Amino acid sequence: MSEVVVVGGGIIGSLIAYRLCQAGLEVTLLEAGKAGQATQASAGMLAPYAEGLGGELLEWAREGLECYPGLARELEAACGVRVPVVLSGVWSLERPLLQGWHTLRDLEPRPGGYLDPLRLLAAVQKAFVSLGGTVRAEEAQRLEPGWVHTLTQRIAARQIVIASGAWSGRFGLGVRPLKGEALLLAAPAPPGPVFAGAGYALPRGRRVYLGATRREGWQPGVEAEGLRWLHRYRDAHFPHLHGAPVLQSRWGYRPAGPLTVRRLEPGILAATGHGRNGILLAPATARRVTAMVLESWKARR
Ligand SMILES: Cc1cc2nc3c(=O)[nH]c(=O)nc-3n(C[C@H](O)[C@H](O)[C@H](O)COP(=O)(O)OP(=O)(O)OC[C@H]3O[C@@H](n4cnc5c(N)ncnc54)[C@H](O)[C@@H]3O)c2cc1C
């Protein structure tokens, strides 16, 4: 029997699994390998003040921003994977940036920065495995207290954590997919994330990550309409990027809906609904879920 089975290996499930393993529990991470995982398409901005967050969400976002430099150091020591966390500041523009990045010099950024979510996910999963955690490439079909059912078997688990992102609706949670499409452009990178209008640009290595669309529903892939939106957006807000070669397009389903980080019933918790800010909110979510699991653990003993 696993002490905990975490359903979903995006950033939320993976960081929770790592923290629980660190706390000494035997943890299995189930990952179905769905196309459209949000984490792999994410821009990776750590921008608590540019996203209009308030109340408790803003508190969690600030906590995330504060945690990342230490978390990156910890992961590098644990598994050797470096995750650069760049606290460049974040710019929010009211007007299009007509002259190029150098004009940002005259504007004051707000606290924040960015990281590469793919590196982060790789580091967290590697650190989890190095602590003795188990990753299984399987899909949870049905859950009941004490059991996770897959197509081929049922896995016993004292605690189950649902962290299946936009797919969490199948377990009765009010989460829906909000597709985001983005482009990697071969052009000099800005000094940090720059928000303008309904989108943003930020560095990805020495290139520019430009995003992102917001499209309701399940519709796999980058669509022609999404590409048109991105090109129009680029020309309207960052015209100096016009003509920059497109190196890659990315897409993923954000888990939209109410942020749900709580116990659902004895033996089953949920950590989903992180919408547009799941990378930023992951450390605070993992901390709270770990505390909830450990609390019920102590109560049983
Ligand atoms: C284009 C784009 C840009 C973004 N930019 C930012 C940003 O700049 N900053 C920020 O903080 N956030 C950003 N986000 C949001 C962030 O990426 C998400 O909130 C976060 O990645 C959600 O993580 P998750 O683990 O909940 O979901 P996911 O990363 O989608 O992972 C869910 C996982 O669950 C698995 N799964 C599903 N069902 C099952 C099942 N039944 N059994 C087993 N496994 C299952 C899937 O295969 C998937 O791997 C962005 C998102 C997008 C799409």
Image (cartoon, grey):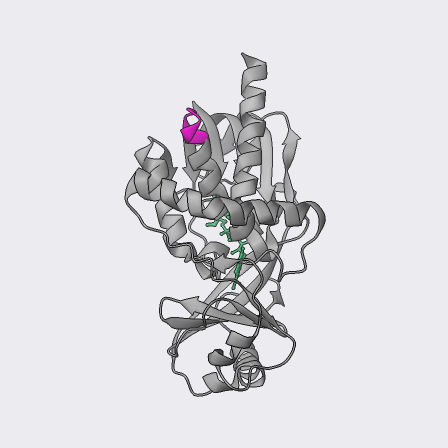
The answer to if 193 sits in the magenta stretch is no
The x, y position of residue 116, in whole percent, is: 41, 58
Q: Image height check: is 173 above or below 276?
A: above
Which picture quadrant has residue 22?
top left
Please indicate, yes or no, whether residue 214 appears anywhere in the rendered image.
yes
- Above or below, comparing residue 104 to residue 86 in the picture: below
Q: Tell me which corner region of the image, top left, top right, bottom left or bottom right, holds residue 256.
A: bottom right
**Where, quadrant-wise, is the N terminus in this rendering?**
top left
Split into 4 quadrants, where in the image is the C terminus? Answer: top right
How far across and how far down the image is residue 281, in percent? Answer: 56, 48
Tell me where residue 278 appears, x and y as whole percent. Answer: 55, 51
Q: Position of residue 15 (x, y in %)?
A: 46, 41
Of all residues, the one furthest to the front in this rendering is 106
Residue at (56, 41) in percent of width and height: 284
Residue 25 belongs to the span the image colors magenta = yes
Residue 164 appears in the figure: no
Magenta region: 20-26
Q: Is residue 99 above or below residue 293?
A: below
The residue at 46%/31% (across/down) is 20
Q: Which residue ends up furthest to the left in the rendered image? A: 80
Q: What residue do we see at 42% from left, 50% from top? A: 33
**Closer to us: 100 or 235:** 100
In the rendered view, tell whether residue 211 sits above or below residue 77.
below
Q: Residue placed farthest to the top in the image?
A: 301
Residue at the right extreme, as displayed: 55
Q: Nearer the viewer, residue 141 or 260?
A: 260
Instruction: Please tell me which residue lies in front, 109 or 29.
Output: 109
